[in-house]
Image: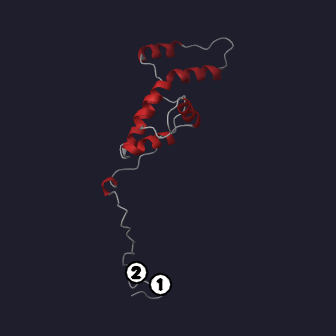
Amino acid sequence: MATGMGSPTKKDDFEPPDIPFKEGCRALFADCHRPAIKPPPSFDSDTNLPLWRRKVDLHLANIPTDNQGPYIFSLLSDNVQEALWASDLSTTATATAIWSKLEELYQVPDNRAESRTTFWSRRQLLGETVEDCANQLRVLVA
């Protein structure tokens, strides 16, 4: 029985609180043991698409396939979304259609050995600022 301390409406301070149960809601207890995964950053035109896709795939594993398209759209920067819409990709497109369009628009060179050689042989040009040279190196890395 509660005395002057604690809640005056409860009979026992150690009694668990009443939690209302809604009939339509269900708790996902299967995922309660999983640690929270940090959401991936938004995709921009200078982002490495294959690496970003691997990060997004971690999140898409628990999302129904019908909802994956809008989720991917929500992770795209404004200029990438505009590029997709300019290419007549619907906002209700499936995840597969979005991935194929992104791979078409933001291709990554397949020849990694050639890319590595290009990166290591890149030198700052006369009249080129350090910032411009660093930006070119970032483009080669991405």
**In this picture, residue 58 sits left or right of residue 124:** left
The answer to whether one can see residue 61 in this image is yes
Q: Label 2 neighbourhood size at 10 Å, few (<14), some (14-19), many (20+)?
A: some
Residues 87 and 105: in front is 87
Indicate left or right for 142 with 130 as reference. left
Can you tell which mark lies on residue 131?
none
Query: Residue beneath label 2, please?
Result: 13
Image height of 63 relative to 30, above or below: above
Q: Nearer the viewer, residue 13 or 104?
A: 104
Label 2: state its secondary structure: loop
The total number of labels drawn is 2
- First in sequence, mark 1 or 2: give its number: 1
The residue that mark 1 highlights is: 5
Q: Name the image colouring.
A: secondary structure
State the residue at coordinates (38%, 41%). Answer: 58
Badge 1 marks a residue whose secondary structure is: loop
Residue type beneath disc 1: Met
Q: Left or right: where does residue 98 sit relative to residue 24?
A: right
The vertical placement of 71 against 14, above or below, is: above
- 76 or 7: nearer the viewer: 76
Callout 1: few (<14), some (14-19), or many (20+) C-alpha neighbours within 10 Å?
few
- Distance from the alpha carbon under mark 1 to that under mark 2: 9 Å
Specify the amino acid type for callout 2.
Asp
| Res 142 visible | no
- Residue occupying the far right of the picture: 127
Residue 73, x across and y down, in percent? 49, 40
Which image quadrant is residue 109 in?
A: top left
The percent coordinates of residue 123 (x first, y second) are 58, 13
Disc 1 to disc 2: CB gap under 8 Å: yes
Above or below 40: residue 99: above
